[in-house]
Image (tube, grey):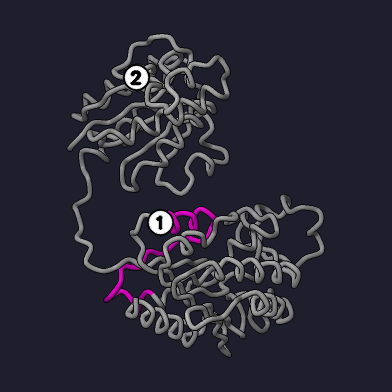
Amino acid sequence: MTGRVCILGTADTKAEELHYLKAVLLARGADAFIVDVSTGGDLHAADVTAAEVASCHPDGPEAVFCGDRGRAIAGMSLALTRFLAGRTDLAGALAIGGSGGTALVAPALQALPIGTPKLVVSTVASGNIAPYVGESDIGMVYSVVDMQGLNRISRQVLGNAADAMAGMVLHNPPRHEDTHPAVGITMFGVTTPCVTRITETLRDRFECLVFHATGAGGRSMERLIDQGLIRGVLDVTTTEFCDHIAGGIFPCGEERLDAVSRTGVPYVGSCGGLDMVNFGARTTIPERYQDRVFVEHNPFITLMRTSAEECAAMGRMIGQKLNRCPGEVRFFFPEGGFSLLDQPDGPFFNPDADAAFLEALTDTLEETPRRQLIRLPCALNDPAFADAMTREFETLFEDT
């Protein structure tokens, strides 16, 4: 082990829990230190005081100890992000908190490098944790009981979290020498045959990083593009645009493809999953969509076929995004369907909706020698389609 575990929490209300975590980590042989992120301005027992952390705020401690809870949490969060970024002795981070404390530490942990062990024991970890995890590799543990002193439940949960952190920092996986350039590839279950064939073809020359296109997957890929870790993109599955347009649960957000635009990495994209919007259980679907075509993917996910209007909106949005990309861009249109569900006799087969996407994309995309739309007379999951995307990507990468 090199470095120490940073234990984060508000020592004004959770000192007992913080010191318990430290004791467990030390007993396991992992060095650790407590960082107080309380926002009241008082001094509490910790290895690093709240005042020391607050001093990292660009406007000074007064921006944190301001008397307004919302502003104080936001200010301490920014100060903590800067504090952790400046540490050279960090082996991992273990945080505890309720809703406020979790919101405070989350941005700082998200900013740490992927691979640095990070765990949060939180009262909100059984709900929607997407805002707290973002595109990082934060592990969330539900506290079961609120953290108001130690008891038979909290000792067990906190002890498990400390043991998990000790295991991560004391037994790092062996280093692997990266000899191949990394390529980002997006996938959904309904585009798996295409992505599987692509990765099998590329694996001898590239390290294929496959991202599940669930909103967070696309953001994770783009974060790594910005960091220079991903050298090219095979965006087979752009389905996150569907949820952005129609209000599904896995949206990409306005920033999708911006990293490709900023960096100019070679980009080969397609229409994978543009035939579907993701919702939760059938009972959660908005009333305005009740007359649409649905497929129950599992008890927790219901898929809705995109309409011609939605497909046209995606065509315009993707076209506008690609127009801002300065690097080599190829976008493949599969005339035989966008997924395993969008094919003859499939529940989402709708050539008119697919054609609406193509028309809007064609009208929007400004084609140049470096930016091209390629139509193929096959379905996205046909081997010939995967092979064509692969060949084009290999050619573009060799030329860059």
Q: Position of residue 50 (x, y in %)?
A: 39, 18
The answer to which of 26 and 258 lies nearer the viewer is 258
Q: Are marks 1 and 2 in contact (CB under 8 Å)?
A: no
Instruction: Say which element carries label 1.
Output: helix
Q: What's under tag 2, amino acid-wise? A: Glu
Residue at figure coordinates x 59%, y 54% from the top left: 253
Camera sees residue 150: no
**In this view, 330 is above or below 283:** below
Residue 86, quarter of the rendered image: top left
Q: Position of residue 377 (x, y in %)?
A: 58, 90
The answer to which of 50 and 31 lies nearer the viewer is 50
Cα separation between marks 1 and 2: 31 Å
Magenta stretch in the rendered image: 199-223
Residue at figure coordinates x 50%, y 39% from the top left: 132
**In this view, 255 is above or below 141:** below
**In this view, 181 is above or below 27:** below
Residue 211 falls inside the magenta stretch: yes
Q: Position of residue 110 (x, y in %)?
A: 42, 41
Residue tagged by mark 1?
226
Residue 246, quarter of the rendered image: bottom right
Residue tagged by mark 2?
52
Residue at figure coordinates x 44%, y 14% from the top left: 149
**Lower sequence index among marks 1 and 2:** 2
Residue 351, quarter of the rendered image: bottom right
Q: What's under tag 1, amino acid-wise? A: Asp
Instruction: Say which element carries label 2.
Output: helix
